[in-house]
Image: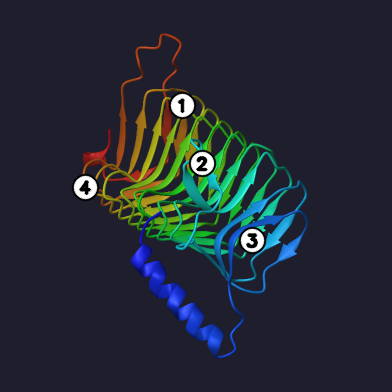
Amino acid sequence: MFAKKTMAFVAALAALFGSVGVSAATSGTKSIFGNYKMTQDHYGTIVIRRNNVTLDCDGHYIYDYVNGSTQSCGIYGTDTCGVIAEGKSNVTIKNCRIQYHDIGVYVEGGNNNKIRYNSASQCFEGFHFYDTPQVEAFQNYSNNNIYNGFVVEDSASCVLERNIVYSNLDGFEIVNSPACMVKTNLVLSNSYGIQTGGCHFINIYKNGVNSSVINGISVSNTYFATVSHNYSKSNDGNGIQFYRGCSGRIHHNTATGNGRYDLYYYDNGNDPNCAGHNWYSNTYDTSRGF
């Protein structure tokens, strides 16, 4: 938990607004057992307790709770989270605006969960998905978080689409999550843009990744990755980088104006079965490729 002075100020404003007729915010840990639509802001955590539930925040805020503890979450169980869905399937979380938590939205276990139209800012991490196959994140904002905009771990067949991710440490960190689709996201001014490792058969398609402090798109230890039709520009490091792995298809990308290399590949790990990557029809400065 952090930024307590800021949160105390926000709480004071909420109290002031309540005194002039604005609906007072709720607080603490709120458990959801069925479809629920918020009518006021909430200080604390919302926990989804059943499958097949939709939480619609309807544009309301979920803030970290200054004056008491809320249910912990995360892989180690030591974080505070705005919304938690653990071991639940077919859950939809939408229209939430989350600030100041360790993790904005945390989903672990279950499958086929949908995270749509939310924003997470000034948290440690915006969105964290762990061991939850077929999770979908669609048209969310994740910005100005201390660490990562999105973390996806051990979550096969995820879909990350049309999200806007800016001014975080990593925009997307995707690990050991095969067959994910990462498409049409706007990833701006993060330290790393889209960073993946061990995500075999991943498809990174038609994203805009600009102005990263280090690399734009980085793929490591991955077989049969497809990276196509992306724009990776004006990153301080490499535009599109591959490290180890093989049999990837990298084509029809535009990688220009990057600080080190526009396209960069190194070290296949001396794998005798590695067929190499297939690079074709990319637009880049030929003096800054490979």
Query: Which residue is label 3 attached to?
Result: 94
Residue type, mark 3 in image? Lys
Cα distance in 3D space between marks 2 and 3? 20 Å
Query: Which residue is label 4 attached to?
Result: 259
**Residue 239, image x and y in percent?**
32, 44
**Residue 2, image x and y in percent?**
37, 57
Query: Which residue is label 1 attached to?
Result: 222
Instruction: Using a 10 Å C-alpha cutoff, classify the residue at mark 3 as few (fewer than 14 neighbours), some (14 to 19) or many (20 or more).
Output: many
Above or below for 274 versus 19: above
Q: Earlier in the sequence, mark 1 or mark 3?
A: 3
Query: Which residue is label 2 attached to?
Result: 74
| Secondary structure of the residue carrying numbered label 3 | strand
Name which residue lies at 30% across and 50% down: 256
| Most foreground residue, 280 or 88 | 88
Instruction: Using a 10 Å C-alpha cutoff, classify the residue at mark 1 as few (fewer than 14 neighbours), some (14 to 19) or many (20 or more).
Output: many
Q: Earlier in the sequence, mark 2 or mark 3?
A: 2
Please indicate whether residue 5 sits to the left or right of residue 135 in the image. Answer: left
**Among the 4 quarters of the image, the one containing residue 275:** top left
Q: Nearer the viewer, mark 3 or mark 4?
A: 3
The quadrant of the rendering that contains the C terminus is top left
Q: Earlier in the sequence, mark 2 or mark 4?
A: 2
Residue type, mark 4 in image? Gly
Residue type, mark 1 in image? Thr
Q: Nearer the viewer, mark 1 or mark 2?
A: 2
**Residue 250, image x and y in percent?**
44, 36
Q: Nearer the viewer, mark 2 or mark 4?
A: 2
